[in-house]
Structure formats: C-alpha cells, structure tokens
Amino acid sequence: MSVDTHELRVRLEAGLGRAIQDLRRQPSHYSSTYPLEDLCVQLDDGTRLQFILKDISRPPATSLKPAFITDPRREIDVYRSVLAERSLGTAHCHVAVADETNENYWLVLEKVQGVELYQIGDLTVWHAAARWLAQLHARSAVSSHLLRHTPSFYRLWPERAIANARHPERIAALTWLAKRHEQVIERLLKLPATFIHGEFYASNVLVETSQNALRICPIDWEMAAIGPGLMDLAALTAGSWSADVRQSLADTYRDATAYSGDDADFCSALDCCRLQLALQWLGWSRDWQPPAAHAHDWLAEALAAAERLGL
C-alpha cells in the first residue's frame, strides 16, 4: 500500500465533510494499469459507504504501457477539472491528490455498482453508450495534461508496430500499411478535434441500472486526449460485431452529433480512425497480450480498414 492510511482517512474526511469511524481497504477485483483498492468506510453515524482508491503514482513493474504516453496528472485533471459538474454520469471524485514534489498521485472515486458493457448483449444499451459518447464530444475541455493527436503522435505507431512484429508476413503487411499511412494522417487531421476518452472500449464502460434508469459510466481516463471524436467510436465498435451492427451503432452516434459530411465521408473517416487505433495497439508493446476475453486481431482490423479506404 503506497497510499498512507492516515493521510487517506484525513483527506477522505475532508472530501466527505464527515468523520470516519472505520476504514477498511482491500485489493479490487477490477483490473487497471494501476493498483486499485476497494474502500469500505463507516461514518460516525453508522452509515457505510464504498469507494475505489486508484494509486496512479507509478504503474507496476508488470505494466506494458509505453512510458512516453504516461502522465499521472492526466486522469486526476480529467476528474478534478474536465468532468466535474458536467452531469455526464461519470464516477464522482471525492479526493484527488497530485503531489508533484513527492510524486504522489491518487484518486478516491465513487464505486459504481455496474457491469462492464462487454458483458451486456442488449444492443439498446450499446446504442445508449453511443449516444452518451456524442454528448461527451459536444463538450470542450482545457487541460495541459491531455494527450494531443498530432501528426507526430500518429506517426509513432506504425514504426513501433513494425519493430514489435515477430513474423516476416506481419512485418511485410505492416510495412505496406506504413507506406500508405500518411494518407490516413492527412484525413485524421481534417476531422474536428474534441475531448475524447481515448480508450472507449466496452471493458472501460460501466453500466448501472436502477429504478428503470440507465447510467453509462466510462472509467480509466488515462489516455484522455484532444483528437477526433470518431476515435472513441472506433473503440466502441471494435470487436466481433457484424458489419450491420457496427453500422447501426455508428449511425446512432452520428444521429446524435452535428457531423456535416455525407454517409460515405462519415464511413471513410471512421475507417481511418479504426486503422489508426489498430496500429496503436500493434505498436503498444512487443510483449503485450490482451486477456483472452478481449483478444482481437488488430492487424486484420487494420488491413480490412485499408481495403475499404482503397489504400
């Protein structure tokens, strides 16, 4: 436990405005790049509350996230400044600590009683997530710690993907993609830039249902950025969906936005984002492997997008 329990209690009492009678900590069953703990708190009047403690001070030695995109202040700033008072249904942040002198960074968040979107087969819930995403992209954000989807950021990934590839046929396919990548970058840079989650995959979206109300609650804002909103839609629609289902989710998102292009323009822009996202995962780490439940052939995804784009 790198977060001191006494400091945790003091800061949480200040955040809640209440005295804490008992505080218990245990590792969370949710997975993340950073250590998570479940907090069980009993207030002075006997009320019991549950929270999540996320220690962003340093990723564990087993983390394979590229160091050049890691900034512990990013997610803290998102919760403290960007998402605060936006009524988007995101987890409430009770404590945000960013002590640069001691390299001490952590959050205490509401423990949302939901399930990951990928566990839900009801397509109406997925369409609700697409509409939520459109709401997010309609908001502006100002933070110096957000990633920026710049030409140099985009160009990093095919180079890393080729370096990570182990087999000649994969290297050849990635080299073919890399030679055509500037066409994709040119298109991406023409898309409207907005505040994006950066990893809007179904495993990063909690869904809570209560009293016939549906709450969409994305978590893990470590890759939050300023970039094309369609990058988030590409993440949401990744996976083994049929082409028709993918298109229906994309249509729902588009209907909820002010996208001005025609159908062909929209589909082409989304495919550029899908290709870029696939290259990002292929360039993530030579040793990275997704959990079996989330395994995906990102090279096939990139090549299919390239074919649809006529590269």
Image: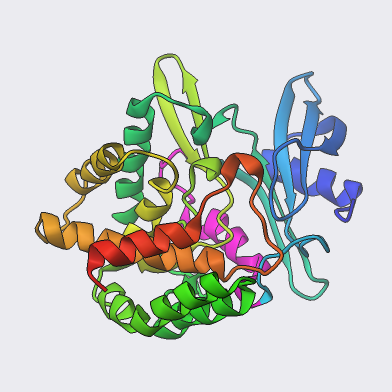
Residue 266: name its quadrant. bottom left
Question: Which of the two residues, 113 or 105, is positioned nearer the viewer here?
Answer: 113
Residue 92: name its quadrant. top right
Residue at position x 74%, y 34% from top? Answer: 18
Residue at position x 66%, y 46% from top? Answer: 291
In the current view of this chain or complex, which residue is farthest to the top?
A: 211
Q: Position of residue 108 (x, y in %)?
A: 70, 46
Is 149 left, or right, of 95 in this rendering?
Answer: left
Residue at position x 73%, y 55% from top? Answer: 34
Q: Is residue 29 visible?
A: yes
The image quadrant where one finds the C terminus is bottom left
The colour scheme of the drawn protein is rainbow
Q: Is residue 92 magenta?
A: no
Q: Position of residue 277 (x, y in %)?
A: 44, 63
Q: Position of residue 122 (x, y in %)?
A: 39, 24
Is 102 left, or right, of 112 in this rendering?
Answer: right
Q: Is residue 215 above or below residue 255?
A: above
In the current view of this chain or complex, which residue is farthest to the front?
A: 169
Q: Is residue 216 above or below residue 250?
A: above
Q: Is residue 73 magenta?
A: yes
Magenta span covers which residues?
68-89
Is 163 left, or right, of 62 in this rendering?
Answer: left
Question: Which of the two residues, 74 or 187, is positioned nearer the viewer here?
Answer: 187
Q: Is residue 139 visible?
A: no
